[in-house]
Amino acid sequence: MELRHLRYFIAVADAGSLTVAAEQKLHTSQPSLSRQIRDLEAEVGVQLIHRSAHGVELTPAGKVFLDHTRMALVQAEAAKEAAQRAAQPARPSFALGFMSGA
Amino acid sequence: MELRHLRYFIAVADAGSLTVAAEQKLHTSQPSLSRQIRDLEAEVGVQLIHRSAHGVELTPAGKVFLDHTRMALVQAEAAKEAAQRAAQPARPSFALGFMSGA
DNA sequence: GTCGTTTACGGGGATCGTAATAATA
DNA sequence: TATTATTACGATCCCCGTAAACGAC
């Protein structure tokens, strides 16, 4: 299980469709996305989405998984940003004044 | 940035050495691990560890990164376990009934 | 008949392991 | 001198994109 799987799953859950998630959000192909989701389900050992002719639908397990998945990605991004912030020695918390960075 | 990078970084931080982390914890080779850590630092844009002749030492940014990284991995594992638990309909805390739905 | 997912296949990129090199106590 | 990290190189594995097939409404 890699962060890529989580990103892909979130995109699918958010779009409600493998096709639109692949082309519109992930800029990849449907077959690749389908395989990644299938691999993810295989590793977790649980069916996360229900395939239908008009898109996909999250299973109860998929909904729970999605919630934790979002937090995991947020933490990963937070780690990156926190490290970047910690690498700026002369940047205290009060004077955020006039520079471009927030 | 993938979960593999985070797992590798945690192992290095925990072992204090690329060599011991590679062979003793990750069961891989030092060169692979060295490259992965370097790639991770390149993506974050911050030096996370300080290389020495007798091991590695976390930079302040590395320590902050490590903290968030652990939480990210915990969340990812929690997602997996929560999904597996949610897929067991007849295994609630005590008596949520016997139907498949929540 | 149309939409959507899945499977098959070939190409490309990334990772890995071994071996050799450089630097430091 | 001994230990550790880095670089070079060849092989292997995984992911991706295109094309064809299956199923549902």
Image: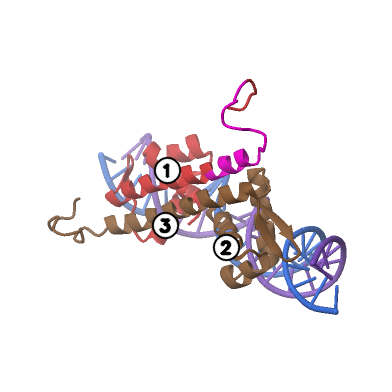
Chain colours: A red, B brown, C purple, D blue
The image position of residue B102, as x and y in percent, is 20, 50
Is disc 1 in the same subunit as disc 2?
A: no
Whether residue B41 can be seen here: yes
Q: Establish if A92 lies above or below B62.
A: above
Asked if marks 2 and 3 fall on the same chain, the answer is: yes
Mark 3 sits on what residue? B77
On the image, the x and y values in percent for residue B86 come to 27, 55
As for residue A98 lying within the magenta part, the answer is: no
Q: Amino acid at mark 1?
A: Ile
Task: Choose mark 2 or mark 3, whichever is in front.
Answer: 2
* Chain letter for the residue marked with disc 1 in the picture: A
Point out the stretch of residues depicted in magenta. A79-97
Q: Answer above or below: position of B95 versus A59.
A: below
Mark 2 crowd level (few <14, some 14–19, many ≥20, 10 Å Cα): some
| Relative depth, front residue between C10 and B61 | B61
The reply to whether dot 1 and dot 2 touch (C-beta < 8 Å) is: no
Q: Nearer the viewer, residue D20 or A20?
A: A20
Q: Mark 3 — on which chain does it sit?
A: B
Q: Secondary structure at mark 1?
A: helix
- x, y percentage for residue A3? 50, 50
Residue that badge 1 annotates: A10
Q: Residues within 10 Å of mark 3 (few under 14, many from 20)?
A: some
Three-letter amino acid code of the residue under disc 2 = Asp
Name the spot of residue B4 as percent of width and height, x first: 56, 57
Q: Tag 2's secondary structure? A: helix
Task: Name the residue tied to disc 2.
Answer: B14
Q: Residue at x 42, y 43 (%)?
A: A10
Residue at 61%, 67% in the rendered image: B21
From the viewer's perspective, is B96 left or right of B69?
left
The residues bearing labels 3 and 1 have C-alpha atoms spaced at a distance of: 16 Å
